[in-house]
Image: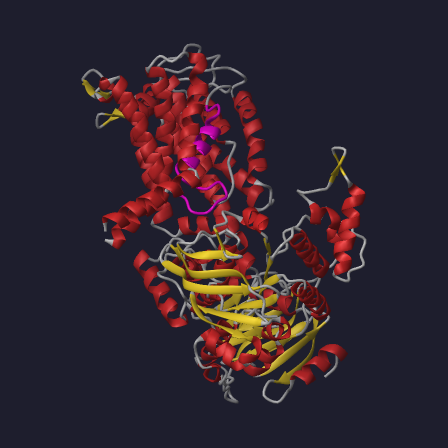
Amino acid sequence: MAGKRFDVAGLMQSKVTWAVIAEALILLVCFVIRPDFFSISYQPSTGMLYGSLIDIVNRSAEITIISMGMTLVIALGGTDLSVGALVAVAGAIALKFLRWDVLTYTTPGDYTVYPYILVIAVPLVVCALMGLFNGFLVAKGGIQPIIATLILMVCGRGVAQILTDGKQFTTGYSPFRVIGQGSFMYLPMPIIITVIVVVAVALFTRKTAFGAFVESVGVNPSASRLSGIKAGNVILLVFMITGLLSGIAGLIYSSRIMSNDSNNAGLNFEMDAILAVVIGGTNMAGGKFSLAGTVIGSLIIRTIVTFVYYFGIVAEATMAFKALIIAVVIVLQSEPVRKYFARRAAMKGGAGA
Amino acid sequence: MTGKNILEMRGITIEFPGVKALDGVDFSLREGEIHSLLGENGAGKSTLIKCINGVNRKDSGTILLDGREINPSGPYEAMTLGISTVFQEVNLCPNLSVAENIFVGRQPMKHGRINWSEINRRAEELMSRFHLDIDVARPLSYYSTAVQQMTAIARAVDVQAKILILDEPTSSLDENEVQLLFSVMRQLRDSGMGIIFITHFLDQIYAVSDRMTILRNGHLVGTYNINELGKVELVTKMVGKDMDVIFSLKRANVPEDSPVMLKAENIGDGSRIDDMSLTLRKGELVGFAGLLGSGRTETAEMLFGATRAVHGEIFVDGEKVSIRTPFDAIQAEEAFCPEDRKRDGIIGDLSIRENIMLAVQSRKGFMHPMTRQEQTELADKYIALLGIATPDCEKKAGELSGGNQQKVILARWMATSPKVLILDEPTRGIDIGAKAEIQRLMLEMCGEGVSVIFISSELDEIIRCSNRIIIMRDRAKVAEVDGASCTQQDILRIIAEGAA
């Protein structure tokens, strides 16, 4: 009895619980207003399932993937502002390989100029190296992560512009279309990629001791070093992973629009990713992290956006409305509120026993 | 001196998740007395004073101030009721003047502006009551820790306090400064104030207090007049064990032919230490004596790779090793408990389990993880072995008391079964029971063949435990003496004069 009572109080203390509750509440409101919000139908022409829920998960793919890396960066006590710019870089490189040289291949069509493997691999490698550059500045240069990653945030889009001579390419290459618009097992491909990424990051951090090392360095870098953890290598690896994941998100994004857009691709993704991590219960000061929480955080952000579109709230009010809901979620998760409910749960459990 | 009770606490119980921090404790404070609050780390002293000044909420019990029940919701409300607290770490603003620090938040006003001359005059008056003749307009950081402490006390008493709580005010003061503080305390007592005094130094308790209350594991042991209880009885009551047993420690027995386990030849870090050599035999305990800054810590850090030795050679178990980082040192089966437990040792937000498994895991590398069950077994084994006071191994290490944190760090290194264990001030800031226990563990490990380097500022524990003592001064080794035959006077003389 005592054990059970303690569990309820403990759950109420957890930020992840509150993220789940918030998501459930938002979905409930959707359901009340539009009962068909939850309907999912099969579209034989595309071989995919359709519905608002599928759409939410599908559209949250880029942020979910990026925020897996962001979770680790924040657990180290840092932030990575460059992820949005890296999304643009990945798209620019992919499109460059698909259409290079545009003067020869004047009209977009179902072809690629360079081998498809380069279209996929080069953007990922470049983004990973850019992440490594961030990590190098932080680990070896001792520069604060927010400043170190500001460099690529600012110049990343410039690099993307230079790579594409400031042009916006479009393509019709169908294997490339599969990444963002294809399907597998009735589900949109971005969902499949997201699941693979989330599982891979979760296995890598929790089935090895890497997650524990990240948390340890995030809480106390000096003590971690003296315990034999190579803190510098941990930092390098985390930033590299984040860069790589930004590259994957960049490929999905540019495949959705079948184009590159150096100005708008991945715009404000860094903020949404940070928000997803924070809503998911990972402390900005570093330390314990929750990948599951981050996934829910990312879903909450996308649910709000879908909600806004779905119910025809005027476009001008979208941002304000999003901010309002996020404010409510953050307050629900704040220390006093969680403590209040935890105490109530403990008292209730006590009375029951 | 037998004034009426100004503060009475009855049946105070405070529960934290999983632990009863205080269990039905009674406490009373009289007008015009200095009342020491004693107990080991984790006994509940801090919890009790935090209950008086409203930081912690009590679960049951009553607090009466002058016969009226009070229930302060925080330090500010407590202060308006006349309860002032000076915490262990001085929390003042070093860049403001002494006078500003005393009056910040309640500056006397004149025509809608701050009346500076009034502030400075009153601050001077207050400080001169403490026999401190200083320029109160200078920034606080200009003055010594003692003056800063006095400023904190002046601030506390100027708000018409009836009760003054001093939590470890003496831990960073030298002897003269302590005397100054005591005279101020006596003066305040004679003016009718009730003072609650917390310290780890037994001598100071006898020097200044009138009564004492002893807590152990959240329970009240008793309240005594100062002349009622001798030191040995006092410690026995605090620890709950017979001290004779604890102090019957025997230094390690090292056979003549015991092999050399650690050898350093002419190591130096290029700036602070130059040309340091030492040997350490299997199962031997070598103490490092010397003043703060004499090079003890720097040497230890070099031996462990925390700072890099730019020249010289290190041999472990007969093999030459290259130690550039702590990771290398761990591979060479060394272990190191650093001096600053909070900054370099404990990883506060992680659980005890994670703190203990860390060094073992980092030696294996992250690709060879220990399973959760292995980690729990390892942690539980050392929790039992070292007597770490915790409900389970999932408690955050940062929530433990100082002595228990030290044990967690010790466990982290014992788990790696090192050949060489370097302990830098492992007993600083922890209570006498935990101190004795750490010394016992140290000696037990020597008995099992571990070679130990023991750095401490307390000469008596160095002499009690060491086979050999290396005396350092001005960043160099000045002498090596036999632990069994030397006295404190010998060592002090060498430290002072610099020659053997």
Residue A202 visible in the shown view:
no
Residue A321, visible in the rendered structure? yes
Where, by quadrant of the figure, is residue B485 drawn? Answer: bottom right
Image height of A238 relative to B406, above or below = above
Q: How far across and how far down the image is residue A164, in percent?
A: 51, 19
* Quadrant in which residue A202 is drawn: top left
Locate the N terminus of chain B and report the quarter of the image it occupies.
bottom right
Figure label count: 0
Comparing A310 with B230, the one in front is B230
Q: Which residues are magenta?
A: A266-289
Residue A201, x across and y down, in percent: 36, 41
**Horizontal side, residue A255 vs residue B45: left or right:** left
Relative to A280, residue A7 above or below:
below
- Side (left or right) of B6 relative to A304: right
Q: Position of residue B477 (x, y in %)?
A: 69, 75
Image vertical order of residue B106 relative to residue B305, above or below: above
- Relative depth, front residue between B298 and B162: B162
Q: Residue at x 77, y 33 (%)?
A: B111
Looking at the image, residue B30 sits to the left or right of residue A330; the answer is right
Q: Residue furthest top?
A: A107
**Within the magenta stretch, is there residue A270?**
yes
- Where B191 falls versus B247 (above or below)? above
Q: How is the image coloured?
A: secondary structure
Q: Which quadrant is home to the C terminus of chain B?
A: bottom right
User: For the point 51% across and 52% down, which residue is it?
Assistant: A220
Tell whether position B353 is magenta. no
Instruction: Return the x and y of residue A41 as percentages of the image width and height.
Output: 19, 19
